[in-house]
Image (cartoon, rainbow, N blue to C red):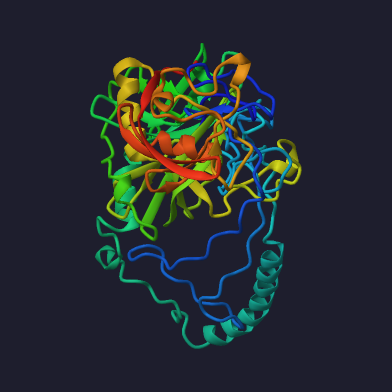
Amino acid sequence: MSTENEGAAVPSEAEPPTGPKPDSAPASASGAQAPHTPPAPGMPPAAPPPPDFAPSAAAPHGEQAGAMPPPAGYPQQPGHDGMGPVPGTEQTARIPAYAAAGHGSTPGGWGQPPYGGGGNPWAAPNPSAPKRRNGGLIAAVLVAALVAGGVGGGIGFWAAGRDDSASTTVSAPGDAGALNRKPTSVSGIAQKALPSVVTIEAQGATGEGGTGTGFIYDKQGHILTNNHVVASAADGGKLTATFSNGKKYDAEVVGRAQGYDVAVIKLKNASGATLTPLPLGKSSNVQVGDATIAIGAPFGLSGTVTTGIISAKDRPVASSDGGGSSASYMSALQTDASINPGNSGGPLMDAGGNVIGINSAIQSAGNGGGMGGESGQSGSIGLGFAIPIDQAKRVAQDLIKTGKPVYPQIGVQVGMRESGDGATIAQTGNNGSEAVTPNGPADKAGLKPGDTITKLDDTVIDSGPTLISEIWQHKPGDEVTLTYKRGGKEHTTKVTLGQRTGDK
C-alpha cells in the first residue's frame, strides 16, 4: 500500500516525494502519507460463523456458551519494512484504523501490510522464535500417559486372561460423502482455488527481500499481487512464483502502482504451468457480515486457508510499500479472517469462491515501541484489510495495458495531521507550489486554500487520508459532489476528476 510521499507532508499530486517531509507540510489529495492517529480502537465484536464454515466450539467447563474469550497476545513477525531483512517472511506495513491516520510511537497507530523483507520502518517486524505455550498441556499429557500406563498394565493383564482379541476401539465407516465438502464449502472452495494461488519470493539486487502471495488474474497468465510484495525485486532483483504443486517459475514485473499497492507480474517461462484464473466478484456488492476466505503464505507457510467475515466496509487505511518511499491508500474491506505477514497479495474470497479483495495489511497492537524493534512486531489480531477487487481490477488493467498506474485527482494539497473535522486545503503548497492547482479540477469548481472538505458524495470525510482513499475509489473523468466549509458556512460543488499517470 503506497503512493505519493513518506512524511507527514506530501507533495503535489503530480510529483509525489521520495522521502520524508516535515510534519507541518500539506499533502496532495491525490495521494499522500497519513499522519499521526490516536490509538486504534478495540477489536470488533465477535460475529457468528457463517453457514458451511467452521462449526461452533463447545464452551469450556465453567464458561457460558458463546462467551467471547479474552483477547490473545499480539505476536509479531519479521518484516520487509523496518526490522531488517528476514528471508522467507512477508512484510506487514502498519496501518491506522480511521478515525484518523497516524504513525510514530503512538500505540495502535499504523498497522502493517503482510509481507517480509528488510529496511522499512513500516514493515512487519521480525518474528522471534515461536513461543511454546503448551507447556501445561504437555505436562498434563505426560501425567495422563504415566497414569494410564500403570492402570492399563493391570487391566491389560486381566483382559489377557480372558480374550486376547478384545478391543474397545471403534472405526469410522470412512464415508467421504458424509463429510461436508460441497463445492460451496470452505474445503470445496479451497481445493478449487489453491492451484491458482502462488507463493512469491522477491529478492533485491543487494539481497534483501521476502515472501508474499499472488493469484492468477487472467488466461494470459498475469498474476495479481501487492506492490510491496515485489518492490524489492523490481529493479534488477529476482522474482519467483511457486504453485501449490511445488513447481517454481521465474517471473517479471509487468507494472506496479505504489499508491494503490497493486502490482502485476507474469511468469517468464510458463510452459507446463496450469494457469487457471480465479473468478472475480464485485466488491461493491459486499455487505458487512458476509463470509470470507483468505488464502496465502503467512510466515512462509504456503497454501494456508483461513475464514471469517467482512467486519467493516470502506475503512480508510494507509500503509507503505516495501521500500518505504511512499504511502498507499485504500478504502478497504475489513475482515476478521486471520491475516499475517506473508498473506499480502493473496485473494480474499466470498462464500461463492469469488475474489472480492487483495489482502494487503493488518492492524497491529501493542506497538508501544514505535516504528521499529521487537516491541513493534505483530501478527493477526482479527483486523485485516483488503484492497477492493473493483479498484484492483481497474488498476491491473492499466498496468497490463501501459505498465503505468493512472490516479484520479482533484488538484489540491491538504493537511494530513488533522482528523475528525474534514480535510483542510493548505494555505500554501509544498516547495512553493500552489495548494490549489491553477486551472485544475478543484480550482475550476471554486475551491480555495483554507476550505475544509467534509463530504465526497455521501461519504463523510474526516481527514486527508480519508479524502484520498475515497477519490481513488473512482476513475478519472468521474463527477463527484464535494461538500466543504468556508468561513463557517457549508457549500457544495461538483468536481470532475482529473488524472495523473505513473508513480513519480
Q: Whole-percent x and y of residue 21?
A: 66, 23
Q: Quadrant of residue 441?
A: top left
Q: Quadrant of residue 269?
A: top left
Task: Identify whether 31 is placed above or below 349.
Answer: above
What is the number of callouts on the image? 0
Task: Identify whether 13 is placed above or below 99.
Answer: above
Task: Identify whether 489 is placed above or below 434.
Answer: below
Task: Identify whether 220 is placed above or below 279.
Answer: above
Residue at point 29%, 54% (across, down): 188
Q: Whole-percent x and y of residue 497?
A: 36, 28
Residue at point 63%, 79% (across, down): 153
Q: Quadrant of residue 151?
A: bottom right
**Observer-nearest of 481 and 280:** 481
Q: Whole-percent x and y of residue 306?
A: 45, 52
Q: Is residue 189 left or right of residue 337?
A: left
Q: Is residue 75 left or right of residue 200?
A: right
Residue 287 shows in the view? yes
Residue at point 57%, 25% (across, down): 326
Q: Whole-percent x and y of residue 464?
A: 54, 37
Residue 409 shows in the view? no
**Observer-nearest of 289 and 421:** 421
**Observer-nearest of 208 and 493:** 493
